[in-house]
Amino acid sequence: MYHKEKSIQIKNSASALYNNLSVLRIAPRQLTYFTVVHANVVNMVSASWDGLNYSHRQLQSKEPNVATSTSLIMQAAFCVLPSRELLVLTSQKGIQMYESDGSIMVYWHALDTPETPTEQAVFARGISAVWENYICVGVSSGAILVFDIPSKGSNITLSEVLEEHNQSVTDMASECSGSQECIANLVTADDGGNLCVWKSGEEFQLLNKIPGFDMSCSSVKLWKGTVVAGYGTGQIRLYEAVTGILHAEVNAHARWIYSLDIAPFSGLLLSAAEDSLVRVWHLSMTPETNTVEVAHLHNECVTDTQICGAKFCDGDGYAFAVTGYDLSEIIRYIQS
Amino acid sequence: MSSRTLPLLFINLGGEMLYILDQRLRAQNIPADKAKKGKNDRKRVMNDIITTMFHKKFLEELFKPQELYSKKTLRTVFDRLAHASIMRLNQASMDKLYDLMTMAFKYQVLLCPRPKDILLVSFNHMDAIKDFARESPSILAQVDETYQQLIEMYTPLSSGEFQLIRQTLLIFFQDMHIRVSIFLKDKVQNSNGRFVLPTSGPVPYGTQVPGLIRMFSCGGDEMSRLQFTNGGNYTSALREGCFDICGDRVTKLGTNMYSVSRPVETHMSGTSKSSAQHTKVNTAPNPLAKEELNLLARLMGGLEVQKPGNADSGFRVNLFATDEEEEEALISRPDELSYGVINIQATKDKQANAELAKIMGEFSEPGDQSPGTSSKGDDLLAMMDSL
């Protein structure tokens, strides 16, 4: 179904962090941007679709005005809003927002870090653009920070802090189908596997809490009102977002899942784990019974690699890209 | 990232160091009439190092929440630890020892089935250390106390917190691809330095063998079951290992892989061109270095270093087959692989840093600074200068 294409070399290897790959298609310029986190650096590659040009950029996690401080980066993700696209970095020190090409840092939010390290680590992790003008970021305390993003300029403000999670936030996702009918448009996940379902607005509204079972939910997606959640047990679960009804449970991987992605137009689901396997699934809605069905389509083994990032490169799922711990390349697969 | 990572890093690396030294001390060619003395030397070296490792003051510092040390600082700590007895290692042997220790623990961290199993790996090391020190009740008491501290600190942690610890360790070991003969022989490491990840065998405790999709109705009834091919050859999980002071840890990761029939390999395997070019060492000065040095200094304050009473009782351990091989290794080691241990010019500018000088003072005893009494790398202060 898929075959391997030429890999993209990156300047440093990928760190073992959840969802450690972000992809942004720049259709007018026939380019795709990729970001991969390596310790305290984000490697950014811009690749032309003809495969002839690759340009590299590295972003450091640096507080503005403090020359000496660098910290480990937890995640880098592109956030696409109707009016603009931003690249968001989260680290132990705070949150940085860049223009999508990484050229200019437009916003910096510092986390409250204690002078001496405490038992509870401090970091931000879990990034998502929500609706027309919000970017949400999770924090190790369990808080979700909601930033209001103007259509241009750097006048970004922290508009709300949502405190429903009691454990470190792991990941979050907004509704990706583009459907206006779905009431829920954000799902957030934590280290206890708890999921919160939200409706965005001037004040975010908690619609539902789906309790976990003491196992981290490391990656989560929201598609046509269905939450797709991947866990440390290697399971994938599909819930109806607003009711919390469990539609499906998949014994998907032999080890910890690191990344899920959905191609919103085709309903293809990508899952990747420490077990060196990437799997492609197909999700379909059955409106009569109001249920979701899952079918397995394809396996891809990246030999001797603990996979840490996997993303579709387009909305149909025609191609996908994969990163792994200690690997200095982005491996690409394309439909045959 | 996780501020609880350092104790596990230290204990597991220390455990691997003891395995290697034990094997090398047993293999060291001791003349027949010195056999008895040789045995005592081995015990003494092991006991001295274990005593230092589990020194109360040292552990108090170690278990405080903190970020990991830089590679350089940690290497310096292990240099001190290895020399906490009458045994001496020169730089090539110390480099090799450290390579073997770090690659062994990287393998264990990478392969442990669940992040929580890092604790079982640590208990395997602790169990072996306890056995090394079984004839010394005072050391055993120290070791038992450390078990308690580990249990108190780590057993309440969630799966996610253990994963954060594991991810922190993997960042520490990132880009280290030194090839180790025992791993290559066992076919658990490839010739490019990457470890083999099996897609067969038992799945981790709490995980189901992949291959089943279950779908449910809105009422919660199971509507259908679908099977899929999982691309591997997995079996069900084994029972869970024991997280108590004593018990069956189930996993073999972290147990002693060396024995008389499987010795610590002495030929060079870690400095091939292919592995060297993967190693990227940040040569920029570390802005945290001064602070780290102070932390290290605090830790060193807890150490009591045994100095040889006379030249005869001290001896040197070689991680290579012959002295010539050892020298060759030192010369041929690529610069990228050099650890560049923090240079403390203790004998040259003692006044430069009052605090450091005070701590250095605890290491030195009258007569130590007179050159000539030492063989290769015999003297701790001289060693620090030469690094």
Image (cartoon, coloured by chain):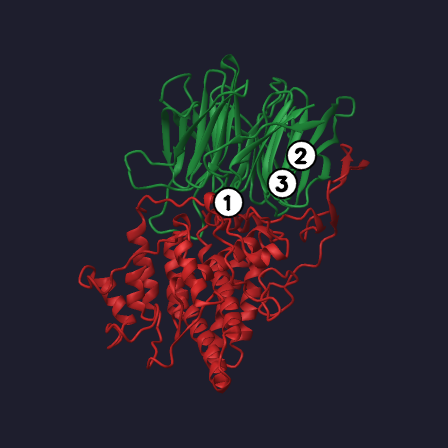
Supply the letter of whichever chain is red: B
Task: Identify which residue, A83 or B132, lies in the foreground.
Answer: B132
Please report, as a chain letter, where disc 2 is located: A
Q: Are the residues under marks 1 and 3 on the same chain?
A: no
Q: Are the residues under marks 2 and 1 on the same chain?
A: no
Q: Nearer the viewer, mark 2 or mark 1?
A: 1
Colour in which chain A is drawn: green
Left or right of residue B21: residue A315: right
Residue type beneath disc 1: Ser
The answer for how far apart the CA atoms under marks 2 and 1 are is: 52 Å
The answer for how far apart the CA atoms under marks 1 and 3 are is: 27 Å
Determine crowd level at label 3: few under 14, some 14-19, many 20+ residues with C-alpha closer than 10 A. many
Q: Are the residues under marks 2 and 3 on the same chain?
A: yes
- In the rendered image, which residue does mark 1 sit on? B274
Residue sitting farthest toward the right:
B224
- In the rendered image, which residue does mark 2 sit on? A244
Q: Residue B126: image x %, image y %?
A: 54, 67
- Looking at the rendered structure, the secondary structure element under dot 3 is strand
- In the rendered image, which residue does mark 3 sit on? A273
User: Residue A214: in sight, yes or no?
Assistant: yes
